[in-house]
Amino acid sequence: MPTTPHPYLPNSVPAVRQEMLDTIGVGSIDDLYETIPEHLRMPEGLRLPEALESEARLVAHMRGVLGQNEPALAARSFLGYGCYQHYVPATCGEINGRAEFLTAYAGESTEDHGKWQALFEYSSLMAELLDMDVVSIPTYDGYQAAATALRMGLRLTGRSEVVVSTAMQAGKLAKIRTYLPDDVAVRLVDVDEATGALDAARVAELIGDGTAAVLIESPNVFGVVETAAEDIARAAHARGAVMIAATDPVSLGYLDPPASWGADIVCGDIQALGIGMHFGGGHGGFIATHDEPEFVFEFPSRLFGLTPTSDPGEIGFTDVAYERTSLARREEGNEWVGTAASLWAITAGVYLSLMGPQGMRELGVAVAGLTRYAKDRIGALPGFEVPHSASANWREFVVRHDSLGASEIRDRMLGRGFHAGVDLGRFFPDRGDQLLLSVTEQHSQADIDALVRELGEIA
């Protein structure tokens, strides 16, 4: 233990540190890490370079680092896999950059009226899009939202098993595994390789009396719409399990909301709702349910609603069921409530209000049409195949070549100025020959034609 206080770290005075250790009943800080395997611990300090001596040197260093970035240009990038280049209206950046939003960390109802109203409006707009009644303030990202939704299912049922589709991003599945309690059994179910979608009968076989929740994603990681979702929800409910659907809200201008086919909890990420890519970092997770008390009281995050004030006829914005959160109950809360992605919620609210129902419908139809066009054009190229060509895809689809691997196709296309999709072999060991392509409203028919022409030439 250091013998002198650190100038920037709180509670680093040796006597204070010892008092904290005594309070929790451990002999040393090392005792707190006993459960972490030895090979995962860092035996020595970080090997950091020498500190930069001035702000000017720091600026020069960061310019050099950022200069290595290769922008995902709209006409040349077909990357997806969880971070998408949907158009960001200028108004979104104008409003989320206002000082009252950008600099407000948290705030309370006594002084932060504007931010609370903006978050309430976001929740209301999302509820309308999702056909749900209650929508949380965003978690860090969609990964966290999916993991928390499963824990809600565990608490609601008191059971200790979950059934989860593997047709999701590998990072999301890893998050679920690490966030669920150690004694929870995670039963994985793969998609049918011919369709890229789940088989309802296969999922039903895994659902038992001990199943707390079933989680599927639609469109799934391969861009395939899970057309058997209603049958899966029926099988889950027959065994008393909670049905959880992960989805991208921007797809719901074209697809039916999961609530319409039986989802009890809907979760996902709001990155596509006017937030932008931000080097892969513009994310916020949402959780939504119907207005049923047993579900509402399992939300760990804050919920905002309306309440009358002391002035007749006036309403204000307030926390709903605040007592269920760790902010009120501390360690007895459902889960820990930390910093939320509130700024992105305000941004998504601006986006939804600008688009309106008709705008979202037009966007969804446009992306669906471009997806089908790209699938058909690439599938017609000699040597290329679209494995799930007969399935319904939205925004993303899988491509493979009869002799070239996905990484080789990517490398060759990058030399021609195209980011030609994501190599699925990086995340799924048995899919090294598969490339995941994404198209959005940012792509034109000419962009897709140019991609197809270059793919034909490299093969």
Image (cartoon, rainbow, N blue to C red):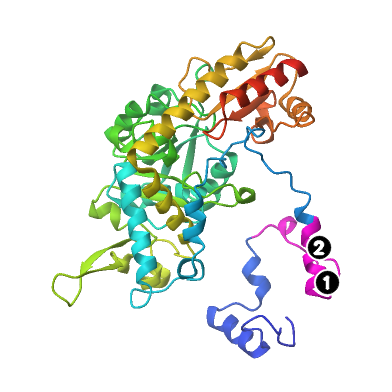
Q: Which residues are magenta?
A: 36-64
Identity of the residue drawn at 83% across and 72% down = 51
Residue 161 in view of the camera: yes
| Position of the N terminus by quadrant | bottom right
> Is residue 40 in the magenta section?
yes
Secondary structure of residue under mark 2: helix
Residue 196 in view of the camera: no
Identity of the residue drawn at 51% across and 48% down = 143
Q: Which residue is mark 2?
A: 61
Query: Observer-nearest residue: 278 or 178?
Result: 278
The percent position of residue 441, horizontal first and vertical second, equals 51, 33
Real-space Cα separation, disc 1 to disc 2, in angstroms: 9 Å
Q: Which residue is mark 1?
A: 52
Secondary structure of residue under mark 1: loop
Disc 2 marks a residue whose amino acid type is His
Identity of the residue drawn at 81% across and 75% down = 54
Identity of the residue drawn at 18% across and 77% down = 310
- Residue 261 lies in what quarter of the image? top left
Query: Is mark 1 in CB contact (under 8 Å) with mark 2?
Result: yes
**Residue most toward the left?**
312
Is residue 376 depicted above or below 68 in this figure? above
Is residue 376 depicted above or below 155 in this figure? above
How busy is the neighbourhood of tag 2: few (under 14 within 10 Å), some, or many (20 plus)? few
The percent position of residue 401, horizontal first and vertical second, equals 69, 17
Q: Name the N-terminal-most of marks 1 and 2.
A: 1
Q: Would residue 240 be found to the left or right of residue 12 on screen?
A: left
Disc 1 marks a residue whose amino acid type is Leu
